[in-house]
Amino acid sequence: MKTTSRFLIRAEGSDTSPFRAGLLIVFLICVLCISCGLETYVYLNPVEIVRATLTWAEIVLPGQSATQYFRNYTIYYRIYLSGTLSSGIIEGPQLNNINPALANDYSAFSPLTIDDNISSVSIDSVFRNRKYYSLCLRDNLNVEKQLYQVLNSQGIIYLDFTEKPPFLTDTTSNKYDLFRAGNFTSQPDRLFINAAELPNSGSNTVNIDVQDSYSGTSYAYVSMYIVATGIDENYSPLFSRPKHIGIFILPD
């Protein structure tokens, strides 16, 4: 009986060894994770509040909690020609009536505007792949300004398409003409107006930010999105969820 008893004790000890080994492995993994550090998820606050009509927009730029990573805001745009005149806010089926390409682009961007988990997605590449470009500005001394020189903090800005040329202003009454992107080989008229040359979008170097229309070119609209941008601790670009500002008609 004693021999059997000793055997049972040894057997019970050997049964618990896998459990103890498992606990040791879990413990070592935890120590490794703590020593190496977990990946930091950086969240940039997106623009949430936009009030817009066909010719005007008010945009509330939020404060950023991750201030060490935030850099500025970027506005992406593309111009669409159309044979249709709209008198109100453009949404839903009206997008296709203005220009089928506008409807396609809007549908392509829609998933990004509702998903916060996109900080690692290259939003810049997504927009540029659909020929959306970064908005520039021009001050009252005719000096070109990049948007990051102006939109780098919280506050309220306004886009006004009721005047020619359209402009951006803020609560301190600083006023900047809206300026089309300047990285084209051949420079078009860079003001946001319905110029006669806009239909000349067949060239790869002139008006590449313009989508032509088979239904007519009497009217021109611009669709805009705003994104908070930054750089993480590894110097990789960061982006917030994009916000669609609106679709505006360009003055003649």
Image (spheres, grey):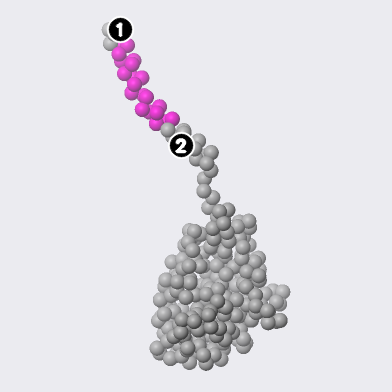
Residue 220 rendering spot, x and y as whole percentages: 50, 87
| Residue 89 visible, this orientation | no
Residue 67 rendering spot, x and y as whole percentages: 63, 58
Q: Amino acid at mark 1?
A: Lys
Count of all numbered marks drawn on residues in the image:
2
Magenta stretch containing residue 210, yes or no? no
Quick check: marks 1 and 2 in contact, CB under 8 Å? no
Can you say which quadrant of the picture contains the N terminus? top left
Q: What kind of secondary structure does the magenta stretch mostly adopt?
A: helix
Give the farthest residue toward the front.
185
Residue at the spot of label 1: 2
Tell me if mark 2 has few (under 14), some (14-19) or many (20+) residues whose alpha carbon lies within 10 angstroms of its own.
Answer: few
> Closer to us: mark 1 or mark 2?
2
Q: Could you say which disc has been placed on residue 29 in the image? A: 2
Residue 226 rendering spot, x and y as whole percentages: 55, 70
* Nearest to the observer: residue 124 or residue 15: 124
* Nearest to the observer: residue 71 or residue 201: 201
Q: Secondary structure at mark 1?
A: helix
x 30%, y 13%: residue? 7
Q: Left or right? Give the position of 165 relative to 19.
A: right
Q: Look at the image and give the residue range highlighted in magenta.
A: 5-24
